[in-house]
Amino acid sequence: MHTTLDFVVFFVYLGAVVLLGCSFVRRSRSTEEFTAAGRRLPGWAVGLSIFGTYVSSISFLAYPGKAYSGNWNAFVFSLSLPVAAWIAVRFFVPLYRRVGAVSAYKQLEDRFGPWARVYATCCYLLTQIARVATILYLVGLALSPLLGWDIKSLILVSGGLVTIYTLLGGIEAVIWTDVLQSLVLGAGMIASVVVLLVRMPGGPQAVFSVAAGEGKFSLGSFSLDFTESTFWVVLLYGLVTNLQNFGIDQSYVQRYITAESDKAARKSVWLGALLYIPISAILLFIGTALFAFYRDRPELLVGPQGPITKADGVFPHFIVAELPPGVTGLLIAAVLAAAMSSVDSSLNSSATLILSDLYKRFLRPRAGEREEMAVLYGATLLWGLVGTAAALAMIRVKSALEAWWNLAGVFSGGMVGLFLLGLIVRRARSLSAALATCTGVILILWMSLSQTGLWPEFAAHLRSPFHKFMTTVIGTAAILCVGFVLSLLLPWKRNGGSFLDRRVRGR
């Protein structure tokens, strides 16, 4: 940042977020308040929190980069959101609200036994460490040239601040800070679009003319080719991923529980999902406009470190070089907001699962209130420290953490398949579910690793021919199909039933 005004805007925002989060310390001194906010929050606030969690710094920086170097193929991912949201509102939200447990994975134990709950919980916890590390590393990478600070210092400061207010304020602090961060995100994106259109030689018409001529608004090929990132591949990938997010992700499920009523919970899903669609379009439009802006003026794509060669670096460069004083500070605050609104939810939801699904379930079922709060505080601090440390490690051993991230994706793919098996296949029982999950995870593992440098050369002919987006799709379908077939072959008792049966009987 180059002006005092930018620093003022940035630090005023940062201070406001931390103070707002810490202001809930007195209202988060019980387990119920820390994990569920007393189940009294309005649907609009929960919805904005869901949206803020959804738009991480990865989306905020990657979407403009994708549109700059390619087209709007990534927007197809957003088009699957209404379908995923409808399924969540129709089936998952009533289930979680009726049961009332803050853990999303208690349902798996009721359906398939303790192994399913432990499997899903451990997979989620590992995934959140990788997620926190990736987000903190990327925000440090993005803010370093903007602020002129060392990446390590940025990771430590951002990770430390998020951990502090999440630890003190609980889920209510997470949700209300997410509301503020969502507003900052929206303001920052709108400001970027306005400046781009105003400063574009030839005006807004030139942006659309250049972009249309280069095919920048294309949603991708409509061919049935599953080896490329076609329209249908991204749509299937988006549907499965968004089902996972809105249906089984603890970060989202826990928010449904905090809503003041069933109606408010349903409203939060629709608000968070539908708000992301125009916002993702704005992020992609920023990348398209950046392409038009710099196409005939490549001499402007030079930063302090030399020419900007990576597409992901164009938007941060534009923020520093082209935005007016004050707006630069706002955009840098927006980048940080995208990171903080994702990290805080990961920390709180992870601490909640450690208490409910591991500590109380297996170690201390009759733990008192003070002991439970100590576990929540300790788990939040521990996961904040581990995530921050992993982000620091990513600076030097990025390839290892990329492999870790791939493995986290493998396990999360098995989670959504297991949940859908419990939802759809009434005859499925513990053994058929376990065998189906193992089959799906092995398939996902093969598809993931065979497309990386970890795959041995002598087995090159056994590489997966599908695009990487199809990994979770095929793995999830395999779990459902294998589980269905095994449920027909293995002995079955009429007691129990699917999640859907239980939801109907609970009315």
Image: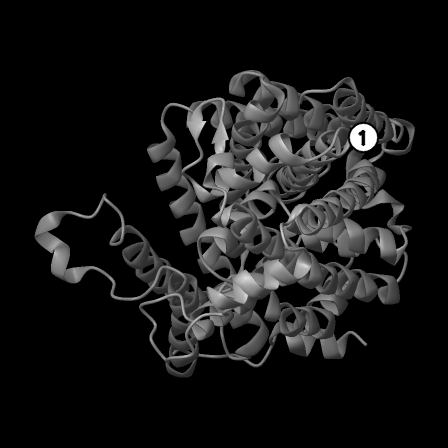
Q: What scheme was used to colour the molecule?
A: one colour
| Lateral position of residue 224 relative to residue 262, left or right | left
- Label 1, residues with CA under 10 Å away: few <14, some 14-19, many ≥20: many
| Lateral position of residue 346 relative to residue 307, left or right | right
Provide residue 501's location: percent of width, then percent of height: 66, 78
Q: Nearer the viewer, residue 253 or 459?
A: 459
**What residue do we see at 8% from left, 51% from top?**
458
Q: Residue 153, relative to residue 486: is it above or below?
A: above
**What residue do we see at 85% from left, 39% from top?**
33
Number of numbered tags placed on the structure image: 1
* Element type at mark 1: helix
Quadrant placement of the C terminus: bottom right
Provide residue 456's location: percent of width, then percent of height: 15, 47
Provide residue 371's location: percent of width, then percent of height: 75, 27
Task: Find the residue positioned furthest to the front.
Answer: 202
| Lateral position of residue 481 relative to residue 96, left or right | left
Q: Which residue is mark 1?
A: 17
Task: Find the residue positioned furthest to the left.
Answer: 458
Query: Is residue 65 something that shows in the picture?
Result: yes
Write down the quadrant of residue 85 in the picture: bottom right
Q: Nearer the viewer, residue 145 or 12?
A: 145
Quadrant placement of the N terminus: top right
Write down the quadrant of residue 346 in the picture: top right
Q: Nearer the viewer, residue 361 or 304?
A: 304
Query: Is residue 107 something that shows in the picture?
Result: no
Provide residue 420's location: percent of width, then percent of height: 54, 70
| Lateral position of residue 129 relative to residue 377, left or right | left
Write down the quadrant of residue 77 in the picture: bottom right
